[in-house]
Amino acid sequence: MDWYNSSRLLSTRFKRRDLLRGAGVLTGVAIASQFSARVMAQPRFSGYPFTLGVASGDPLPDGVLLWTRLAPDPLNGGGMSENAVSVRWQLALDEGMRQVVKSGTKIATADFAHSVHVDVRGLEPGRTYWYQFKVGNEISPIGRTRTAPARDQTLNRLRFALVNCQDWQNGYYTAYKYVAEEDLDLVVHVGDYIYEYGPEPGGPRQHNSPEIMTLNDYRNRYALYKGDANLQAAHAAFPWAVTWDDHEVENNYANSISENEGESPADFLVRRAAAYQAYYEHMPLRRSSLPKGANLRLYRRLTFGDLAQFSILDTRQYRTDQPCGDGLKPLCEAALDPKATLTGKAQERWLFQGLQRSTAQWNVIAQQVMFSQFDFDARPEVQVFNVDQWDGYVAARDRILSFLDQQKPSNPIVLAGDIHSSWVHDIKRDFNQPSATIGTEFVATSITSDFPTQFIEPVTLALSNNPHTKFFNGALRGYVRCDLNRDRWQSDYRVVSTIREPQATINTLASFVVENGIPGAQRA
């Protein structure tokens, strides 16, 4: 009998929602007691080793990536010895883990913080599975995941949540509690999973560690964030597709260029290498994203039947320096430089090739920063742009606009985050004059990160200078729930009542629909 099946308690006492909500809450003693008669005494830990929960990611038609990390003392380097540890895993057709279809062992090593990445293959397309890990006498919480439909399958519906920007000090992750309760196939995270900053007084949650610089610093910061029960529940409920923005390393860095004047690229790349390794250690990513020094291949593509193709971009690792001195500025000549790039040549070429070959009905570009032009100054005679966004890389954006206009991939949708506020844009062939709408952009507000209150009124006034912008809200935090079928795409802007207290309600602030074959968003 499999070691998961020694008791009916998993299917009776611990219901699925309890397990998902309580990821990280169940103690190792409570779970291991069910299996103590069936396991050999192996490693002993100073505490429960699965404090950071479980996760899955990047679903394929025949597989999915499973993740966990052993960390009995998570905020102090993990609390593991230098020894390698054998971790057993199983994947089942039922939440009680009785119908096991795949199992194996994985060696967790100190070199990668005793993280575990299991690339499970040979699965059925479009099917829900449950999974769990075991080490010594300790059993992890149960996670749920789902494979993608077959690439040639006619798919009638896909649902996912768009999330980003979760500054731990700035508020509670109640939004993730509600994400975990949604009926979804996927969660898409477009960056700023952690923040590198030191203590920031004034927030409802505080930490005392200084700005993170070393590999151990980054590991401890991820452990702080991933210890949150609501975040763990959202990871345990659905597979995730993740990409980073800047704060996983340093605010507004560009390639090998630090925001700190005087820091050499060589010195900064040491920090970037540490940050990239820690990111891999804590995310459900395949070996194709295994870091090589200060380099990590993160851009990749996911397909969901014939309904949706996701091109997931990395707009930090390969970008040229922000023009015009960064920040909110009138555009300088450098912002128009055709050599300036957010993606690098290879990634841009990869994006175009994927869109050109796509047979999907909805073609999704999931990336970090706002793509559409936005003039932040309400005065018609003055223009001010955020040059850390695509507005600072005009020629690079125009190449994409030209491609979309000429090649006409079906229903292009751009997803973004970064700006800690909610937006909806019609993507225009030329934002500076009346022109065709060739796509739609949905920008999700943050989970907790702040949008300065004093900016809300000026941005609202500036909407009159940006007629392609259909919606803006800077006051509320949450996520976007996307529901697409063969006739339309609907984005629901889900917001919590507060991030200052652990308890909050949720409601739908606004909903927008894109009809199949008709670019541009309309109020639902």
Image (cartoon, helix red, strand yellow):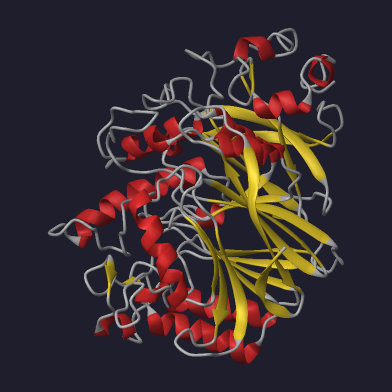
The quarter of the image holding the N terminus is: top right
Of the pair 523 and 297, the residue shown nearer to us: 523
Q: Residue at x 51, y 65 (%)?
A: 313
Which of 489/468 is in front? 468
Give left or right: position of 128 versus 432: right
Q: Nearer the viewer, residue 467 or 412?
A: 467
Tell me the residue at 27%/51% (across/down).
270
Give the residue displayed 30% in from the left and 83% down from the top: 381
Percent across and percent down for residue 518 are 72, 80
- Give coordinates of residue 300: x percent, y percent: 58, 64
Residue 316 showing in the rendered view: no
Residue 77 placement (x, y as % from top left): 37, 27
Q: Is residue 331 above or below residue 84?
A: below
Q: Is residue 374 left or right of residue 98?
A: left
Asked whether, in this view, residue 169 is left or right of residue 42, the answer is left
x and y percentages locating residue 56 in the rendered image: 64, 43
Q: Can you see residue 2?
A: yes
**Residue 520's image quarter?**
bottom right
Residue at x-position 27% and y-position 74%:
323
Q: Is residue 395 above or below residue 80?
A: below
Image quarter of residue 513: bottom right
